[in-house]
Amino acid sequence: MDGQVFLSYSRRDSKFVDQLLNDLETAGINVWIDRGDIVAGDTTWRQQIVEGIKTSPIFIIVLSPDSFESDDVSSELTVAHKYKK
């Protein structure tokens, strides 16, 4: 697969997301995920997320009751919509 997949999720869904991430990577899919692609403590993390969404041809959102309540997931979805992902 060319490019990468951006994975948006609520931290409360980490167990499911860990399995999804493993499955995608096992299938040879390059995944952009905040835990692995942002350096801890970096003050530009919001801009890095926007860049991750912009440069990923595919945007996957893990929908759950927790993700519906997450401001971060909502913001990521807004950015993805803006860039027609």
Image: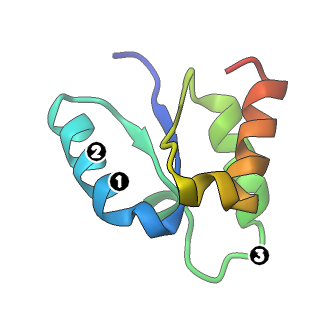
Quadrant containing the N terminus is top left
Quadrant containing the C terminus is top right
What is the spatial separation of the Cα atoms under label 3 and label 1, in whole angstroms?
Answer: 24 Å
* Residue at the (64%, 83%) spot, across then down: 41
Secondary structure of the residue carrying tag 3 is loop
Callout 3 crowding tier (Cα within 10 Å): few <14, some 14–19, many ≥20:
few
When the figure is inspected, residue 36 is found, relative to residue 27, above or below; the finding is below
Query: Residue type at mark 1?
Result: Val
Query: Residue type at mark 2?
Result: Leu
Callout 1 crowding tier (Cα within 10 Å): few <14, some 14–19, many ≥20:
some
Residue at which label 2 appears? 20
The label shown at residue 40 is: none
Quadrant of the rendered image containing residue 56: top right
User: Seen from this angle, which residue lies furthest bottom?
Assistant: 41
What is the spatial separation of the Cα atoms under label 2 and label 1, in whole angstroms?
Answer: 5 Å
Left or right: 36 in relation to 53: left
The label shown at residue 17 is: 1
The coloring applied to the image is: rainbow
For marks 3 and 2 on the same chain, the one whose residue lies earlier in the sequence: 2
Secondary structure of the residue carrying tag 2 is helix
Seen from the viewer's position, the closer of residues 51 and 13 is 13
Q: Position of residue 50 (x, y in %)?
A: 74, 45
When the figure is inspected, residue 70 is found, relative to residue 43, above or below; the finding is above
User: Seen from this angle, which residue lies furthest left?
Assistant: 26
Q: Position of residue 33 (x, y in %)?
A: 48, 52
Query: Residue type at mark 3?
Result: Thr
The label shown at residue 43 is: 3
When the figure is inspected, residue 2 is found, relative to residue 76, above or below; the finding is above
Q: Position of residue 20 (x, y in %)?
A: 28, 44
